[in-house]
């Protein structure tokens, strides 16, 4: 299975949240993990936001960041470029998405062109998930 993860799905690997266990099960079944290159900034920003909001100790947040960086090198990452931006334009015209959500959906669309078989789109944003379903993706949750 090809598993596309937006940032909301990625974060569930590093912090125990609702549906984290189910996501980790899908992660374990995946042959390839795909995300957009913008997920790096979104994910580390969310880690430090959680640190500030929850008063996490520096050692804990460093372990989380280190685990993410180790995983990051194994991901197939979709870069933002002119080809992707053409798809971004189409998806924002079609769906009410924020900028990074449009990049994630466009990244999945572009990836599916090369890796069409058994593709699962994981995200925990209602609008993004709806757009993904309308693009023909099977979504999780």
Image (spheres, rainbow, N blue to C red):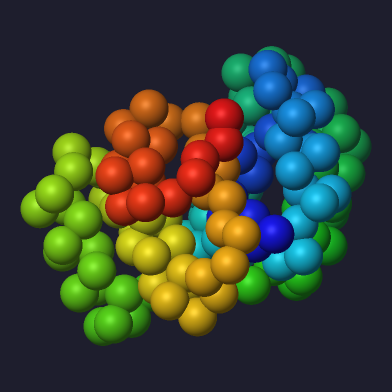
79 with respect to 70 (left or right): left
Q: What residue sits 18% from the left and 38% below the top?
A: 96
Q: Nearer the viewer, residue 68 or 76?
A: 76
Whether residue 6 is visible to the viewer of this picture, yes or no, is no
Residue 65 drawn at (x, y percent): 77, 49
Residue at far left of view = 93
55 sits left or right of 100 in the view: right
Q: Quarter of the image containing the N terminus?
A: bottom right
8 to 87, vertically: above or below: above
Q: Which residue is located at x 75 percent, y 71 percent? A: 73
Comparing 102 with 54, the one in front is 102
Report if residue 131 is visible in the image: yes
Q: Position of residue 30 (x, y in %)?
A: 76, 57
The percent position of residue 103, horizontal first and vertical second, equals 35, 59
Q: Identify the residue shown where x is 50% and y is 31%.
A: 124
Q: Is residue 4 above or below residue 73?
A: above
Judge whether 95 appears above or below 55 on screen. Answer: below
| Residue 60 in picture, x, y percent from top left | 87, 34
Q: The C terminus appears in which quarter of the rendering?
A: top right
Q: How many marks?
A: 0
**In the image, what residue occupies the spot 77% across and 48% down?**
27
Q: Quadrant of residue 127?
A: top left
């Amino acid at each position: 299975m090809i598993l596309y993860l937006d940032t909301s799905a990625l974060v569930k690997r590093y912090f125990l949240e609702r549906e984290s266990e189910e996501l980790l099960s899908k992660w374990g079944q995946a042959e390839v993990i795909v995300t957009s290159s913008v997920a790096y900034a979104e994910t580390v920003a969310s880690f430090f936001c959680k640190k500030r909001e929850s008063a996490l100790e520096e050692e804990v947040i460093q372990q989380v960041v280190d685990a993410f960086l180790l995983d990051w090198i194994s991901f197939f990452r979709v870069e933002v470029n002119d080809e992707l931006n053409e798809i971004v334009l189409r998806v924002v015209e079609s769906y009410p998405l924020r900028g990074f959500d449009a990049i994630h959906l466009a990244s999945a669309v572009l990836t599916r062109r090369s890796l069409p078989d058994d593709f699962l789109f994981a995200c925990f944003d209602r609008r993004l998930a709806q757009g993904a379903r309308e693009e023909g993706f099977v979504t999780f949750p």
